[in-house]
Image (tube, rainbow, N blue to C red):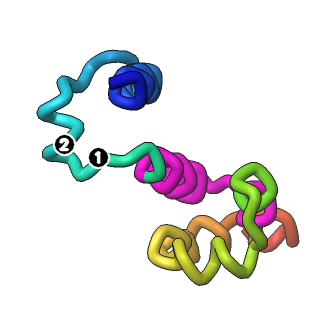
Amino acid sequence: MRDRLKLRRTRQAADGGLLTERAWGSAGRERPYDLRHTCITTWLNAGVPVAEVARRAGNSPEVIHRRYEGCIDGHEEVNNRKIEQAMGWA
């Protein structure tokens, strides 16, 4: 019972209390570990450097690359523009 209350509070803190217990279950967020995965994925999609995500998550950059490579893919165009601007090519 105590663990369920702790999990409910964690879920409410993560979503601002917007999702019901049923919505959380249907979204596949049934374990606290799923919140960690969602957080890492969100950081990567926001463009936070892999090394920083790894440091905050307590993993190595290699683990982040291997486990979350799908989140990192698709950022090539954005990164190319950053490189071009930094080099003065844009």
The answer to whether 84 appears left or right of 31 in the picture is right
Q: Position of residue 78 (x, y in %)?
A: 59, 65
Where residue 68 sits: x, y (%)?
A: 53, 72
Amino acid type, mark 1:
Glu
Q: What segment carries the magenta color?
A: 34-52
Task: Estimate the spatial distance between the alpha carbons at disc 1 and disc 2, rounded to whole Å.
Answer: 5 Å
Please, what secondary structure does the residue beneath circle 2 have? helix
On screen, 62 above or below 18?
below
**Horizontal side, residue 47 vs residue 2: left or right:** right
Per the picture, the main secondary structure of the magenta-coloured stretch is helix
Crowding at label 1, few (<14), some or many (≥20) Cα neighbours within 10 Å? some
**Based on the displayed image, in which of its 4 quarters is residue 72 positioned?**
bottom right
Task: Judge whether 17 appears above or below 32 on screen.
Answer: above
Q: How many marks?
A: 2
The residue depicted at 19 percent of the width and 28 percent of the height is: 21
**Is 35 a magenta residue?**
yes
Task: Please give the name of the residue rendered at 32% of the width and 24% of the height, measured from the top-left corner.
Answer: 1
- Residue at image coords 75%, 57%: 58
Q: Amino acid at mark 2?
A: Gly
**What residue would you read off at disc 2?**
25
Q: Nearer the viewer, residue 78 or 14?
A: 14
Q: Residue at x 52, y 49 (%)?
A: 36
Which residue position is annotated with label 1? 30
Mark 2 and mark 1 in contact (Cβ < 8 Å)?
yes
Q: Quadrant of the C terminus?
A: bottom right
